[in-house]
Amino acid sequence: MITLKAKNLLPLLLSLFIFLSCVLFQTTAQAADNHFTKTVKVQLNDGPREVKTVWIDMKDPRIRVEAVLAKGRIGAVDSFENIYNSAGDNETEVIAAINGTFFNSYTDMQPAGNIQTQGRNAFISNNGTSIGFTVDNQVRMESLYTTISGSINGNWDYPYNWSVWGMNQVYSSADANVLFTPDFGDSVDAGSKTAIVVRNNRVIAVQKGLSPIYSDGFTLVFGAEAYSSLFKTGDRVDYKVNYHLIDFSDGIKKGNPIDWSNVRTTIGAGPTLLKNGEISLNAAKEGFTDVKFAGRAQRSFIGESRDGFLVMGTVNNVTLSELASILKDMRLKNAMNLDGGASSALMFENKIITSPSRKLSNAIVITKKKERPVRIQLNGREMFFDTDPYFYNQRTMVPLRGIMEAVGAVVGWDSATGTIWALKGDIRVEMRNDSNIIRVNGVDREMDVPIQVRYNRTHVPVRFITEIFGAEVDFVREKNMVTILMENSNPTDVYDRAVAELNSGNTAGAERLFLEVLNLDSSHAGAMLKLAKLYASTDKAKAAAYYEKYLEIQPKDYDVWNSLGWIYSDLGNVRKAIDVFRHLSEQNPDTAAYWIALGELHEHYQIQDYQAAKEYYNRALNCSNISESQKSKVYEKLKKF
């Protein structure tokens, strides 16, 4: 017989009370394969609740989780039914759906959390929690700090790197900088701001007002003149989406970087409810301070069980704390809150279980493919396309533009001849839809299957087309995955590796990789500038040559002109150095450093024009931005005359 001392009785009774306040006492279920709906009845202090849930076996490789936008774009709303039905086609069955992230339901209908669909980012956010789904149906749940950084002509460093406030977001602020993609629509009104219109990563227009967003590009809208003035027609423009964990230690700020590259679908909402089976709830810490997060409301949630099921559900009239306790008692492993209230919605097998009372901005939709999806990896990194790869006559077909851009080739269309072309380095490929003849550097070659148009996209056999450009291709049957190995396939990737080598002190390795970048993209100004700076201390003639090439692309980079002027001087070509600083003084007449340089160069023994040197020094003294140290230097110089 066990006896309890009085001091141990109170904790036991309190624990028992908490358990009874959220007890699961009845469940009902409908099973279909390994996916089913189940209603879980729980008893709270003030009465019973029904937790309506859908369970999806993520071990089924045909299952996909999609983030679906209303009417296919940011800022639109539609009925829940229309949204989830839009994810189905002849190859795809819609199994279940739940509402997604928050949105401005009373104003501009803009969402408020991360949205990634088919591997591409449609919206970014820096608070709350995001749930991500990889191509092999692994579930990830993290607090993400998502940013965008960009480059011009391969320059990822100041002054040609750029950033934006958001993606497909509408800001009222006059100085807002935003990137707009086709997920926003086919145009954006820049108003008095400057729009940079990009196609195939090249600037085709710099303009004001209503501006197009092309399906093969994006449009930047800059309120900050300091950014918009950097761009000109013909520039190459690239951007990266950067993922970090949110650091909650002091407000919300960027934390450690995180690899999110293998995630195909992301929806951000929050807050987190469970982490590793334990309650992990702090709404205010995640940035949710609205009163609606404190009280009872209709709630939607998504999470995963310990045995590999995705669990989605809704429950009425509960606090976030009560919801977290319910899900813990249901033995979920990880879970997070979604949008709720009038947006709560749940469907299974085309039957709406919880009906929203408003139109929605987005939804999480579970689909099942008729065939197991084909995966493509390039150099170990998962690749995503806007149409699925498929098998045809034992060949894997992939979207032409997507695969060509991934391996660093430029794709174009000759309307006069109806020819599609792809160019990388010294290899040019020409082809036509519905033909199995492909021309490589003027020589016809025959493929096993013809080029096909499906889903309004041109598709090509992945092995044949990538091997032309030097790739090694294999097929991993157990993963239904094509692997492509291609050294130095993408200039940006090679450039990143070169910078890493340079930062580690391996200048020889960095030099080799920067040269490889230029082999892949001869107009990559970023690599030119890095090489010029590398050679500035070892081979000034080479440094001058790369500075000159760089300035052909970035003619207004006055810092580089300055460096080139002194390189010319070091090489003994004083007259060319004088030409450079004259150019600089004409462009920036109030910059004292350029007049001082002209003075010193005219004192040079090759020139010895002391009267001109004196005039230039005096011009320097008239500059409004001259520093005290520069003044002292000039006065010392003038004492000689």
Image (spheres, helix red, strand yellow):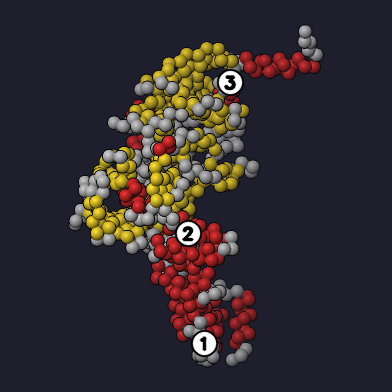
**Residue at screen point 53% across, 33% down:** 270
Sequence-first disc among 3 and 2: 3
Within 10 angstroms of label 1, few (less than 14), some, or many (20 or more) residues? Answer: many
Q: Compared to 13, does 461 lie above or below?
A: below
- The extreme left residue here reads 416
Sequence-first disc among 3 and 1: 3
Within 10 angstroms of label 3, few (less than 14), some, or many (20 or more) residues? Answer: some
Residue 244 placed where, x, y %? 55, 45
**Residue at screen point 54% across, 66% down:** 508
Residue 609 placed where, x, y %? 51, 91
Horizontal side, residue 214 vs residue 577: left or right: left
Amino acid marked by disc 2: Tyr
Per the rendering, the mark at residue 495 is: 2
The quadrant where residue 476 appears: top left
Sequence-first disc among 1 and 2: 2
Residue 152 placed where, x, y %? 43, 60
Q: In terms of secondary structure, where does tag 2 sit?
A: helix
What distance separates the C-alpha of mark 3 from that of mark 2? 50 Å
Q: Quadrant of the N terminus?
A: top right
**Residue at screen point 37% across, 36% down:** 373
Between residues 454 and 365, which one lies in front from this camera angle? 454
- From where the camera sits, is residue 356 visible? no
What distance separates the C-alpha of mark 3 from that of mark 1? 84 Å
Between marks 3 and 2 in the image, the one whose residue lies nearer the viewer: 2
Instruction: Please give the residue where the numbered disc 1 appears in the rendered image.
Output: 602
Q: Quadrant of the C terminus?
A: bottom right
Instruction: Please give the residue where the numbered disc 3 appears in the rendered image.
Output: 329
Amino acid marked by disc 3: Asp
Amino acid marked by disc 1: His
